Amino acid sequence: MTDCCTQKSKMPRLGEVLISRDRIAERVKALADEICHCYGGQENSELVIVALMTGSLVFLADLIRQLPLRVRVAIMVVSNYPGRSTSAEGVRINYDIQENIAGKDVLVVDDIFDTGQTLRAVVDLLEKRGVRTIRICVLLKKLIARSENLQPDFVGFEIPNKFVVGYGLDYDNLFRNHPEIAVLDIEHG
Ligand code: IMP
Ligand code: MG
C-alpha cells in the first residue's frame, strides 16, 4: 500500500444517517409555516433574516424559498473557539451584516445549537442595534445541558450529543454538500 492510500484511509467519513433528505424537506416546510404564522399577520412589515455562515447555507436556501413573506437576507460570518472563559472571548465576528436593523424584526438562522455560545454572542450584539424583535431559528439542537440562558424559538430537530455533518454542517469544511445529516465517523475512518 502506498503512503497516499494509507493517508486516505485515515480520513473521517460519513457514518450513520441521522436524518434523511425527505425528513429534512418535510420539517423545513413545517418550520417555514411556523415562522409565517408568527410573522405573517404583521402588515407592511419586513423580516430581516440574519444567517450565520457557513453552516446555515443550505438550510437558509431551502427555508427562505418556503417563506411567502417580505424578507431581506443578511449574512454574518462567525467562528467560535470553545474553551475560552466567556462567550464574548470565544466567539469572533469575521464579517458583519451590512443591513440597518434598527426597528426591524430579526430572525437569526443557524445550523445547530450546541453550547449556545455563538447565538448568545450574536443576539447580544444585534440587540444593541435597537431591533424591534429578535428570534432564533436553528435546524438542529443538541440535547445537552447548557450554561447559556437562551433558547431558540424555532427548532427543526433535537438530536443526541454527536458530531454531525451534511446539509451545510461541516467537519474541517468538508461534507457540507452531503444532502442528509449523518454522524461523523472518526473511529473507522
Ligand atoms: P455553539 O456556539 O457551541 O452553539 O456552536 C455552534 C456552532 O458550532 C455551529 O454553528 C456549528 O458551526 C458548530 N457545531 C457545533 N456542533 C456541531 C456538529 O455536530 N457538527 C458541525 N458543526 C457543529
Ligand atoms: Mg456555524
Image (spheres, rainbow, N blue to C red):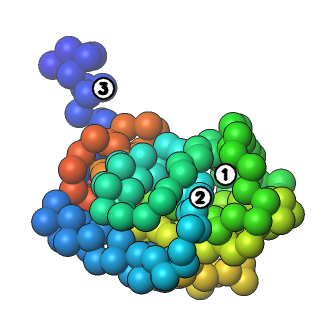
Q: In x, y percent, where is residue 49? A: 55, 57
Dot placed on the residue nearer the N-terminal end, 1 or 2: 2
Quarter of the figure with residue 65: bottom left
In front of the other: label 3 or label 2? 2
- Give amino acid for label 3: Gln
Dot placed on the residue nearer the N-terminal end, 3 or 1: 3
Q: Quadrant of the C terminus?
A: top left
Q: Quadrant of the N terminus?
A: top left
Q: Residues within 10 Å of mark 3 (few under 14, many from 20)?
A: few
In front of the other: label 3 or label 1? 1
Q: What's the residue at 29%, 77% (across, down)? A: 30
- Give amino acid for label 2: Val
Mark linked to residue 80:
1
Q: Is mark 1 within 8 Å of ligand 1?
A: yes
Quick check: 97 left or right of 186? right
> Does 161 sit above or below residue 58?
below
Q: What's the residue at 56%, 63% (across, down)? A: 47
Q: In x, y percent, where is residue 179? A: 21, 50
Residue identifier under label 2: 48
Instruction: Give SS at disc 2.
Output: strand
Asked if residue 181 can be seen in this view, the reply is yes
In front of the other: label 1 or label 2? 2
Quick check: 165 left or right of 47? left
